[in-house]
Image (cartoon, rainbow, N blue to C red):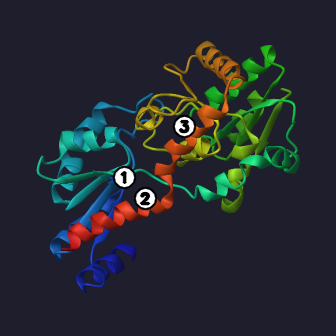
Amino acid sequence: MLVHEMKKIIKNSEVDLVHLHGHHYPITWLSEFYAKKYNVPTVLTLHGMYALNPYVTGGKTLLEEIFNKTIFKYILKNANSIIGLTKSIVNYAKNYGPKEAKYYEIPNGIDLDSYERNLHKKAEYRDKYGLPKDKIIVLFRGRFTHVKGALEAAYAAKHAIKSRSNMFFLFVGNGPLKRDIENILNGVKNVKILDWTPMEAIHELYIASDIYLLPSKWEALPITLIEAMAARLYIVSTPVGGIPDVLTNYPLKTFIYSLDLKLMVKALNEALRKICIKNGMINNRVSAYIAQYDWRNIVYKIEQVYKVISK
């Protein structure tokens, strides 16, 4: 029914262009097929690169390479414009797409105002969510799945707390591994697990925290990364997908080059030491850097792509 309605809308010229999101989904392939058939221009936004194996850091597999040289290559060939969230994603597309195609680098964005006007409320938000005021809070926010490194994050929290009583770990999210995480952290002090927060309150838990832990096995440009930067958090992350592109000029970071437990704990300890010397000059650099991810700037850039296609 959905495909039939989509075909009808495109065929009857009810739209001026079709904006496709993600290249791994059949709905993307079908939408592009009908747009091409009925001469409706398309924009394809790529939200990731290798993504078919949630257990492999980086996600690259032989199966996906076959997919890229067949289906992905065909999708790129037929798109009028291609948007990658980061430079790495754009280069990834160029590796399989036609040289003459129009490629744009436009990242995800967030409502920066909700962060900027509330940065001073750290103590207030800690009170609201029952979080300690005398601890360094490490936040993990995301789906509790293998690809997000949720189990590795739980084990790292369990071991880090043994030697760092001033650390507190906050896990926010849900997913198939929630029970496993609860079992790993059962009886461990200085840990709290919360379900998803309402959209309008997302900024509160970031601002209440000090360090953001992102041990994903693959990513494109996670919104959570931008949210963490907006809250001025120190970021401990794997350098996968588009993450290195985004963090290159962000001064508060430590990369985890392996999800080895000892290396993760070491990275968290390094973050703990470094946030103690964070100063106003660094905060000013972060403010200037994060401005590019304001939704108003992102929307403007996408509108310019639409205008080029519509000429």
Residue position for label 1: 106
Question: What secondary structure is marked by label 2?
Answer: helix
Q: At x 40% / y 35%, what residue is drawn? A: 245
Amino acid under disc 1? Ile
Instruction: Tell me, for residue 298, which label it has, or none.
Output: 2
CB-based contact (under 8 Å), mark 2 and mark 1: yes
Query: Is 258 left, or right, of 38 in this rendering?
Result: right
Q: Is the residue marked by circle 2 packed among few (<14), some (14-19), or many (20+) residues within 10 Å?
A: some
Amino acid under disc 3? Arg
Q: Earlier in the sequence, mark 2 or mark 3?
A: 3
**Residues at marks 2 and 1, CA–CA distance in whole angstroms:** 7 Å
Q: At x 41% / y 38%, what residue is drawn? A: 242
Q: Earlier in the sequence, mark 2 or mark 1?
A: 1
Give 226 or 154, whichever is nearer the viewer: 226
Question: What secondary structure is marked by label 3?
Answer: helix
Q: At x 65% / y 44%, what residue is drawn? A: 231
Amino acid under disc 2? Ile
**Residue 304 coordinates in the image, percent (x, y):** 30, 65
Q: Earlier in the sequence, mark 1 or mark 3?
A: 1
**Residues at marks 1 and 3, CA–CA distance in whole angstroms:** 21 Å
Residue position for label 3: 285
**Residue 22 coordinates in the image, percent (x, y):** 36, 54
Q: Is the residue marked by circle 3 packed among few (<14), some (14-19), or many (20+) residues within 10 Å?
A: few
